[in-house]
Image (spheres, rainbow, N blue to C red):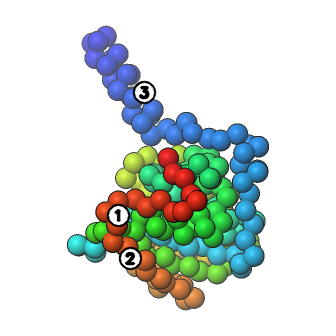
Amino acid sequence: MFKLRNILAVLGLAILAGCADPSADPIEEIQARTYVSDEPPSITIYTVVNDKNEFGEHTGILINASQQVLWDPAGSFRSINLARSKDVFYGMTPQMVDYYVSYHARFGYYVVAQKLEVTPEVAEAVYRRAVAQGATGKLRCTIAATSVLNGVPEFSQLSTTFFPGKLMEEFAQIPGVVTTITRENDEGQNYAPGVNAI
């Protein structure tokens, strides 16, 4: 019994360690990377879609609030040109936004961007909820995203779901959403000129 208890305790710690994300840049680095966009406040949902079966495989959210950040729950995206705390990336200039899209768009996958202009208050509420969410465990990107979004009254109609495609379909029904699709044919993740990725 003692051995079983010890094994379960070790397994529990391993699971927690797998879900935790220890990478958080110093607050000074995050502040130094702050980017404030001239564009109106907005929320942009990014969905990475498998070209073969049209199945959504990842969700990320660009939040243009008091500053523009990328919230990429459980994502693989990295760049030494951005500051990061848990799943939130700071310093999302237009170049870095393009790089994020290009990073995911490749042979067999395309990226759907759904942009919705919102009030500053709504953008800030989503931003604060994303920051408070913390690190997201693998395969939980969309349930984390929908939980953050539908906690804001303006997005309360969105279902809480594990499926990126379902969020994409429901978000498309909101009046004012502008959708763009990016397709690229490279064989792997892209490296934009002048941008270094880990």
Circle 3: residue type: Leu
Nearer to us: label 3 or label 2: 2
Q: Secondary structure at mark 2?
A: strand
Type of residue at label 1? Glu
Callout 1–callout 3 Cβ contact below 8 Å: no
Q: Which residue is mark 3?
A: 13
Task: Decide which of tag 3 and tag 2 comes sooner along the chain.
Answer: 3
Contact flag, marks 3 and 2 (Cβ < 8 Å): no
Q: CA distance from mark 3 to mark 2?
A: 41 Å
Quick one: SS at disc 1? Answer: strand
Which residue is found at the position 71% from the left and 68% from the top? 65
Asked if residue 126 can be seen in this view, the reply is: no
- What separation in Å lies between label 1 and label 2 (alpha carbons)? 15 Å
Amino acid type, mark 2? Arg
> Circle 1 sits on which residue?
57
Rendered position, 156 above or below 131: below
Which of marks 3 and 1 precedes in the sequence?
A: 3
Q: Position of residue 163 (x, y in %)?
A: 36, 65
Q: Which mark is residue 183?
A: 2
Percent of width and height locating residue 61: 54, 65
| Badge 1: residue crowd in 10 Å (few <14, some 14–19, many ≥20) | some
**Mark 1 vs 2, N-terminal side:** 1
